[in-house]
Amino acid sequence: MSAGQQARRRDAAATREALLGAAARAFAERGFDRTTVRDIARLAGANQALVFRYFGSKEALFEEVMTRGGREQLASTPPERLLEAALRTLLTRDQPDWRAHALEAFVRSIGSDDAAAAIRGELSDGYVRALATLTDADDAELRAHLVLAWLLGIGLVRSLAGRGPVADADPDEICALVLRATRALLERTG
């Protein structure tokens, strides 16, 4: 491969990352419906045609912003460590741009059918399936959904409130308390 081809590939990767970061910021500020492809391209310093080239549509870009980190986490984390890993991701403030804004983008886009479908689909189902394997209770899926709802609530309070006991608490302390409490829901009964 020539140096020119390598530079183009690196530029393509950098452009794709810039578009993901810009989309995450725009969706977090305005929500899915009020964000345009033009807005995203302008924030990324790119041509709007590149959004379609790299992602195919605004909906596909939104889904990538919302599910990218979760898919990576699901693929690389054993179920018994998944809850702590997901919680620490929500509690860590120095995330990549696209991950730092994903929860706010979700909240601002909740009324959009397309946006909500992306979240309800692949990502939440993947976490529920993984967490449900931690218990042998008959209602394992419900228990996993409850844990996931609590996790989402913690993330919302922490990221959107900005101040207060949950937002200001030490991530290690939050993890210790939440993991201790969720053991009752996700324990083996037999």
Image (cartoon, rainbow, N blue to C red):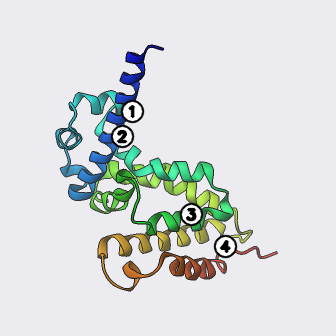
C-alpha distance separating marks 1 and 4: 40 Å
Q: From the viewer's perspective, is the residue at label 3 or at label 1 nearer?
A: 1
Question: In the rendered view, does 79 fall on the left or right side of 155?
Answer: right
Q: Amino acid at mark 3?
A: Ala
Q: Amino acid at mark 4?
A: Leu
Crowding around mark 2 (Cα neighbors within 10 Å: few <14, some 14 to 19, many 20+) is: some
Crowding around mark 1 (Cα neighbors within 10 Å: few <14, some 14 to 19, many 20+) is: few
Q: Earlier in the sequence, mark 2 or mark 4?
A: 2
Q: Earlier in the sequence, mark 3 or mark 4?
A: 3
Residue 159's quadrant in the figure? Answer: bottom left
Q: Confirm or deny contact between disc 2 and disc 3 (CB under 8 A).
A: no
C-alpha distance separating marks 3 and 4: 16 Å
The residue most toward the bottom is 165
Where is mark 2, residue-wise?
17
Question: In the rendered view, does 119 fall on the left or right side of 112?
Answer: right
Q: Earlier in the sequence, mark 1 or mark 4?
A: 1
Q: Confirm or deny contact between disc 2 and disc 1 (CB under 8 A).
A: yes
Q: Can you give x and y, in whole percent of width and height, for residue 88 in the image?
A: 51, 67
C-alpha distance separating marks 2 and 3: 23 Å
Crowding around mark 3 (Cα neighbors within 10 Å: few <14, some 14 to 19, many 20+) is: some
C-alpha distance separating marks 2 and 4: 36 Å
Q: Earlier in the sequence, mark 2 or mark 3?
A: 2
Q: Can you give x and y, in whole percent of width and height, for residue 56 in the image?
A: 34, 31
| SS of the residue under disc 1 | helix
Crowding around mark 4 (Cα neighbors within 10 Å: few <14, some 14 to 19, many 20+) is: many
C-alpha distance separating marks 2 and 1: 6 Å
Where is mark 1, residue-wise?
13
Give above or below for 18 relative to 174.
Answer: above
Q: Amino acid at mark 2?
A: Glu
